[in-house]
Image (cartoon, coloured by chain):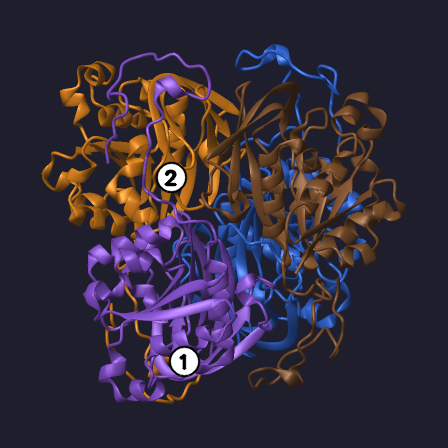
Chain colours: A orange, B purple, C blue, D brown
């Protein structure tokens, strides 16, 4: 059994910004796919914003077990139609990992139903991530804390729903904290938000960060088959009730009707 | 201190369907506002789908502490722009109660980020609601269970995120169950979903149901002032850090920049 | 990799009650171990209340990945010292499944910190379990609902903490509901409560029930090594801080002290 | 309506340690009761470890709406019988606030069912508390962050169950973080853990800390009457079912029996 990962990269700053191009000569999404492909049981490919339908056709999503999303400068260019398709894939059971600035990506905001805002500072400061849920699958092999020497700061309050579990909390040199590893479920899909990864720093080259993301992939993966119609609201007609039941009172709907949406 | 409630009514079946008009001669939203106005410390008004901007102007939302939503046949007619305005009001601290078929309303789906689907049957069957969180503020004065003799069935699985707390679970005569009272928080706003209320039955005339909705209003009300800019993502500039910090490494952003969205 | 399961059986009614002995000629714990041993990757053994230290020596717990607990008539005979040992094993990462009347067992009450009470009726009535979290690992291969024709009723309110996730809710013929599949984490240990299994009915012979328990074993299993000292509260001495720090102010403790408990 | 608060003080270091006696000349519990008594609608009294039954007789608990607990050096001296009485009071609806080192108090460990451990350092370092749930009732009137200049450090991982909501996260000068404001419900009782308050520093003289504790009292208070028997597990006899039901199959229990515990 192999987990099929698709890494979605915005691919803007890698092309336009010299610093980013130097830190990630094989692009950010390329780097992420590369280290995932070194893991047993994971097969990662990449798609980008610039691909037709941003690379996220129905066919591609159907063969994606876990989708990883990195975006920053061009959130607004992602088509709403693709966002809905991604949300439906999550509801049907696709796992999803949102990295760093993807907190403001359209699919994350769509799935959270919340502002997803935070405070921030770009100063190359030290971040230290603390595990808050010991032996959580996403913290597998991770010590109680680890450091990223150069990172952008994200600070609380972080405008997200209360998670299923808080896995990491970050300390920042400038005095802020941030819940940097959070888990959610939407429909049949597992969602993991992981904070680190500003594009001007070599965060995704760091082994501990790579390990968390690989752990996240395994955690988010739902081995069950994908739900065919994750938004269906089936009528259970009166003739077929599980317990004997006689119809009473007035009705709006006819038997077998689809109902209002 | 008075809690200002706005009851939003779709107001379609009350006008077009004889049965509904007879059960709710003063409309559903009118009925809900009426019993809330009999409560100490609650002042309720109504607006409808047919009002300009569906009655939900920025001014109206600004003076609404808790918004109650009932819709069914015309979910699709609610303008997306109003939906966003409502979501922002919730994030800024407005409480919100979604009743019955509002599980498929645009604002509920927007705030949940989930399919919000379920199974259903319109047979006038018996529903019995069980309290699952004793002495929860929303269950105040409610016995361990109470019955609604005629109701539409909603059945699990209910496609919503895991709630903060499950307050009621319903038993249905035909053999189904449903988590019929669920609490959420999105931004600074408290959200309560309450299942009963099919328009062809006199559910909202029933004292126990009225009590739950009044309790829900008090629970959802956030006495704090509304947040001015609930989606702001402020930059915390380097010169003003809480701890001494020296800038290091390359930058994408200029001081005081708004950041990407 | 094989998951080592220990099934703890109270083993009282199987010995004293003719009906139970006929329904479970190989005992309840024996039956549970038997069907688990037919699963790939699971190796189950049994211990009982009557064994020295109830079969739960430190050595046995150290080689148990998931402990399953069924008890009813003799909760009070379980030694507190063993209960503490079990709780510590859970905190260190051992998974645990509590079945049916184990809601009132000492280890469950110890790990929940709550009354764990409910209402009940022994009438051989129909129970129907509904999945409330589609495609949850514990619901793997389980349809939206399944029935147990003869069961004891357990009714809400169920006095447990709000779970991480509600996986099943039961419908009962007599008019009650119950949250019958609940997940928790305590320390590094995953806990699953599963309701069915009154000893006078053949519940654990039923394939769907067996599948849920096997799923529960896989879900509860934590592949990480066990934490050596799950209750340690280490001092982080001043000379070894992660950031430069000068001691200030008065002190109660000496360097390297164990602290109060 | 007045909320009746009982502040439980260990009262050991105030008597034995010169520094503590100087910082809290009217004792810690006395100081806490004093500032609470300046609040509208709160009436606070104090009891101590040294009182008969530690001051927590059934009568005293019956007239306590919210119990505040501060202990450190003498956790082990608290009688188990009193701990059980306190736990039952919480389950029946009494609110409870645990302060600082009370994370290792017997009642907190009893109610959490978890190790409740952490790492620590006594160096008079700076703590900065960040609000993680904006406009939460416990954060009422609290800015996005506030500082305590001299505090003991508590660091993650904090061995507690996932809370209902995380309200505060602390930053420490030495490089650690801590979830310093957490909410729980056990039975009908609301529980708030709040981290600050090492006895050698003037933490409870600080207005912002006082405000959080007062907010916590109002949040934890359950205006419902106390449940008479919070651990009862009533039999619902066959002759009195809510739906028609015929008894089937064999029985263990007689009608009206109390059941096993």
Judge from the rendering whether residue D107 lies leftward or rightward of residue B194; answer left or right. right
Quadrant for the C terminus of chain D, please.
Answer: bottom right
Residue drawn at x 39%, y 43% is: A160
SS for dot 2: strand
Residue drawn at x 72%, y 73% is: D252
Which residue reaches farthest right? D52
Mark 1 or 2, closer to the camera: 1
Image x and y of residue A4, in percent: 28, 38
Q: Is residue A249 above or below residue D12?
A: below
Q: Is residue D74 among the parts visible in the rendering?
A: yes
The number of numbered badges drawn on the structure is 2
Quadrant for the N terminus of chain D, please.
Answer: bottom right
Residue ID for mark 2: A192
Residue drawn at x 47%, y 63% is: B2
Judge from the rendering whether residue D167 lies leftward or rightward of residue B64; answer left or right. right
Crowding around mark 1 (Cα neighbors within 10 Å: few <14, some 14 to 19, many 20+) is many
Image x and y of residue A14, in percent: 18, 22
Where on the picture, by quarter, is residue C204? bottom right
Both on one chain, marks 1 and 2? no
Residue drawn at x 79%, y 34% is: D26
Where on the picture, by quarter, is residue A71? top left
Crowding around mark 2 (Cα neighbors within 10 Å: few <14, some 14 to 19, many 20+) is many
Name the foreground residue: B191 vs B177. B191
Residue ID for mark 1: B151
Image x and y of residue C177, in percent: 54, 70
Which residue reaches farthest left? A52
Name the foreground residue: B226 vs C155. B226
Q: Chain of mark 2?
A: A
Q: Chain of mark 1?
A: B
SS for dot 1: strand
Judge from the rendering whether residue D138 lies leftward or rightward of residue C8; answer left or right. left
Image x and y of residue D192, in percent: 61, 45
């Amino acid at each position: 059994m192999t987990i099929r990962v698709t890494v979605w990269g915005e691919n803007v700053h890698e092309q336009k910004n010299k610093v980013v191009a130097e830190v990630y000569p094989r692009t950010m999404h390329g780097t992420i796919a590369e280290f995932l492909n070194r893991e047993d049981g994971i097969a990662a490919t990449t798609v980008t914003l610039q691909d037709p339908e941003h690379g996220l056709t129905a066919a591609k999503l159907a063969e994606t077990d876990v989708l990883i999303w990195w975006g920053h400068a061009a959130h607004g260019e992602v088509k709403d139609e693709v966002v809905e398709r991604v949300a439906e894939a999550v509801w049907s059971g696709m796992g999803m990992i949102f990295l760093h600035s993807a907190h403001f990506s359209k699919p994350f905001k769509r799935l959270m139903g919340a502002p997803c805002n935070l405070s921030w500072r770009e100063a190359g400061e030290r971040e230290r991530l603390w595990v808050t849920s010991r032996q959580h699958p996403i913290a597998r092999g991770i010590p109680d804390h680890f450091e990223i020497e150069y990172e952008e700061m994200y600070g609380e309050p972080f405008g997200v729903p209360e998670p299923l579990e808080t896995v990491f909390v970050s300390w920042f040199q400038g005095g802020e904290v941030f819940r940097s590893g959070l888990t959610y479920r939407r429909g049949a899909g597992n969602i993991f938000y992981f904070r680190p990864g500003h594009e001007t720093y070599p965060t995704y080259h760091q082994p501990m960060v790579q390990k968390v993301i690989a752990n996240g992939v395994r955690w988010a993966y739902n081995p069950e088959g994908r739900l065919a119609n994750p938004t269906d609201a089936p009528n259970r007609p009166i003739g077929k009730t599980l317990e004997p039941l006689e119809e009473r009172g007035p009705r709006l709907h006819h038997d077998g009707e689809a109902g209002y949406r």
